[in-house]
Amino acid sequence: MEKNSAFQNALRQLASVKDKTGLDDNIYEQLKKPKRFIEVSVPVRMDNGNVRVFTGYRSQFNDARGPYKGGIRFHPNVSEDEVKALSMWMTWKTAVVDIPLGGGKGGVIVNPKELSAGELERLSRGYIRAIAPFIGERIDIPAPDVYTDPRIMAWMLDEYEQIVGHKAPGTITGKPLSIGGSRARGYSTAQGGFYVLEEIVKKMRLGKNSEISIQGFGNAGANMAEILYKNGYKITAVSDSKGGVSNSDGLDIKKLEEHKKQSGSVLGFSGGKDMGSDILETETDVLILAALENAVTADNADKVKAKLILELANGPVTPDGDGILDKKNTVIVPDILANAGGVGVSYLEQVQNAYMYYWSEEEVLAKLKEMMTKAFHDVWQAKEENKTTMRQGAYILAISRVAQAMEDRG
Ligand code: NAD
């Protein structure tokens, strides 16, 4: 049975392209571990007066191409293994979209839904105090990830600026607009995924009446649903952690969002019917994975019916799952390309912070579109030249770029 360690999966993906990349053994050895891994304990005064100690991590994987960059996840399943894997994937992602950044990731083991707003603020400030000596706009730049948002980024930046004694907005991205955030950052992951989807749909000659299913209805998944809906695509099934809802004529995404806001889930939506089976196994042309890692594994890959999978989540298909899908000729647009729009606009946010000059939404979107479309065609070319899958093409491209920077540094 396949072990779903995200970091072991990330290492297998790296190993699978080592020879095709012509990777030097010395560089390969360095790419198997983060350059620095930090574990912190964060004491937080809870509302009842007791102190609870939370465990947090920051993994600084590689900074050959620029400062470490990656989000902070607040989730009960955060682990050393997961944070390391996500930081390795960030390294490849910034390289695929060719921005001058490296890869990092952070996380705290917590269920934020169980905390009051005050407790969440004290935890966010405490975590950033603990890692403050290791971050900075030219060192390591955090951002939001699962269950963290602009409000949390604002607390973190405020705490950091109090520690260093000056304004340093480029230290954290995904901030609210009022303190130096970028327009379009909130939905940038989905928007970037959409630009990539439009390219692959042309290559595969899939029309707008293709059926699209989306696993996960949070920042990435719900924004993607909204963008697709606005652009005339038909979304026939959507799920969240409580279950799924479907409608073969297409779901009204605006109404579904309202329903989720009111009830806390997509379940029970009057414009569709609750799904009895797993959304991953549903009849569909396109499956967008926008929940968490290890959704498609050796156990269920043969039941996936989609012709095309777009990985908006990080690591949603395990290497064994990948192998099974590949045999069935399922096309997979890999995470390190498909969800790079988030870090793409984070980079544009940093550039605006450095210039102290801010672009309109249209300007940001035009830059994002150019970045994502070029990345798609670079990956496609690497795939064609090496006669591989898109995932392997993306890895070959990314690892070659990182290795080149490491070699040039000597
Ligand atoms: P989120 O917390 O906003 O949303 C996650 C969604 O997944 C929620 O709707 C949750 O109910 C759902 N979910 C959880 N388990 C599920 C399951 N078993 N089946 C169906 N749905 C399930 O998080 P997000 O920011 O949207 O992130 C989702 C994924 O996208 C993560 O892998 C994250 O690392 C990746 N990602 C996010 C961004 C970003 O900018 N938000 C950027 C790059 C990658």
Image: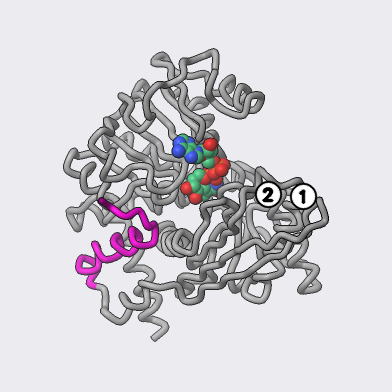
Mark 2, residue position: 150
Where disc 2 sits, the SS reads helix
Q: Which residues are magenta?
A: 1-22
Numbered label attached to residue 178: 1
Q: Position of residue 88 (x, y in %)?
A: 42, 64
Could you tell which of marks 1 and 2 lies nearer the N-terminus?
Answer: 2
Q: Is residue 278 left or right of residue 53?
A: left
Structural distance between the alpha carbons of marks 1 and 2: 11 Å
Where disc 1 sits, the SS reads helix
Q: Residue at x 39, y 51 (%)?
A: 315
Numbered label attached to residue 21: none
Give, as a three-letter code, the residue at label 1.
Ser
Q: How is the image coloured?
A: one colour
Q: Residue at x 54, y 25 (%)?
A: 266
Q: Residue at x 19, y 58 (%)?
A: 386
Q: Position of residue 52 (x, y in %)?
A: 71, 59
Q: Is mark 2 within 8 Å of ligand 1?
A: no
Q: Is residue 51 left or right of residue 102?
A: right
Most extreme residue toward the bottom, as rendered? 410
